[in-house]
């Protein structure tokens, strides 16, 4: 809902509309309904999109606001990612310790994200990863209750909920975020020319370039929410600089790669993906389906 409010505010500001001209329609996603099991176990990212897709298709809503991190790599043709808002803080925040190094020996680290688990275990094989799901408030409550010693959350999500002071942001040269982390996207029906045009006005091209490049890497790796993939792309002077890593589930293996390429060249992320997979052991490659 915080993301939908932000999307509406930007749309109204850009077009000079009154906020009540856009109705916000809350739609509960399966990903919200099922809170007790890891997302990767219960059906993956589609659980964040399938209800909204149906509402769009039926014409009950005209736009759907998503965290792009939660949107599957392959989307139906009748849907268009019509706008990507200026990307927020891309970093993960560590809560419960001031740095990865400062996490106490054998601490319980709460996360259900394969990327966070593997990236943590790579650095700190001594810790115990404990699955933890639910919204930000639930996760913070479980930390406060002592169920876990440490957890990781996206800075963008915390910021949107007015919790930006919580925890210690991890710098991206030391800890990589998820593909598209911090980016809000708005989808609409591909044949809805009016909405496409309205949304194009608030599209942020640099953020779009970065997010599309990261999604192209995901597509080429054949990654899903079981696959530990970390990537960050930054737009600089007409080029995109991408840093990516793939892991084994237990974090023992980590394959890193970087590539700089022209904006809009979506073949380059595919080459980086092929290079990462070529250097992975069969055990890691098995977590990725390939292109
Ligand atoms: N998987 C849940 C999810 N999807 C997007 C965000 C944060 C907001 C964003 O990255 O845009 C979060 C929470 C988190 O990872 O802590």
Image (cartoon, rainbow, N blue to C red):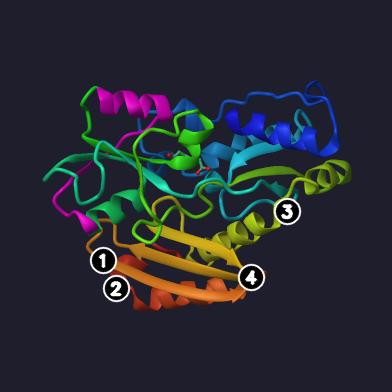
Mark 3 touching mark 2, by CB under 8 A? no
Mark 1 touching mark 2, by CB under 8 A? yes
State which region is magenta.
Answer: 123-144
Q: Which mark is residue 77?
A: 3
Whichever of labels 3 and 1 marks the residue nearer the N terminus, that label is 3
- The outermost residue toward the right is 194
Q: Residue at x 32, y 23 (%)?
A: 141
Front tag of 1 and 4? 4
Can residue 23 be seen at all in this image of the molecule?
yes
Instruction: Label 3: state its secondary structure.
Output: loop
Instruction: Label 4: state its secondary structure.
Output: loop
37 is higher (above) or lower (below) than 80: above
x, y percent for residue 146: 20, 26
Whichever of labels 1 and 4 marks the residue nearer the N terminus, that label is 4
Q: Residue at x 19, y 46 (%)?
A: 102
x, y percent for residue 4: 65, 31
Whole-angstrom CA distance, mark 3 to mark 2, is: 35 Å
x, y percent for residue 188: 75, 42
Pointer 2 residue = 281
Whichever of labels 2 and 4 marks the residue nearer the N terminus, that label is 4
């Amino acid at each position: 809902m915080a993301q939908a409010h932000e999307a509406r505010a930007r749309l109204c500001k850009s077009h000079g509309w009154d906020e009540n001209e856009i109705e916000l329609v809350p739609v509960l996603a399966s990903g919200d309904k099922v809170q007790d099991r890891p997302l990767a176990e219960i059906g993956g990212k589609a659980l964040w999109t399938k209800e909204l897709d149906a509402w769009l298709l039926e014409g009950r809503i005209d736009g759907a606001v998503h965290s792009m991190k939660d949107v599957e790599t392959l989307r139906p043709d009748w849907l268009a990612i019509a706008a990507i808002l200026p990307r927020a803080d891309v970093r993960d925040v560590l809560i419960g310790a001031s740095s990865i190094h400062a996490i106490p020996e054998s601490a319980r680290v709460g996360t259900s994200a394969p990327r966070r688990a593997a990236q943590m275990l790579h650095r700190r094989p001594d810790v115990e990863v404990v699955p933890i799901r639910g919204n930000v408030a639930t996760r913070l409550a479980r930390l406060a209750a002592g169920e876990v010693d440490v957890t990781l959350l996206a800075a963008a999500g915390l910021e949107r909920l007015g919790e930006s002071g919580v925890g210690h942001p991890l710098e991206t040269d030391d800890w990589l975020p998820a593909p598209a982390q911090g980016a809000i996207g708005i989808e609409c029906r591909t044949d809805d020319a009016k909405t496409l045009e309205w949304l194009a006005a608030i599209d942020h091209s640099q953020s779009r370039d970065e997010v599309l490049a990261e999604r192209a890497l995901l597509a080429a790796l054949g990654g899903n929410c079981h696959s530990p993939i970390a990537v960050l792309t930054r737009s600089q002077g007409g080029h995109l600089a991408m840093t990516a890593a793939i892991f084994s589930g237990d974090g023992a293996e980590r394959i890193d790669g970087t590539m700089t390429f022209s904006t809009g060249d979506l073949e380059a992320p595919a080459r980086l993906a092929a290079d990462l997979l070529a250097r992975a052991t069969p055990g890691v490659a098995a977590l990725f389906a390939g292109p």
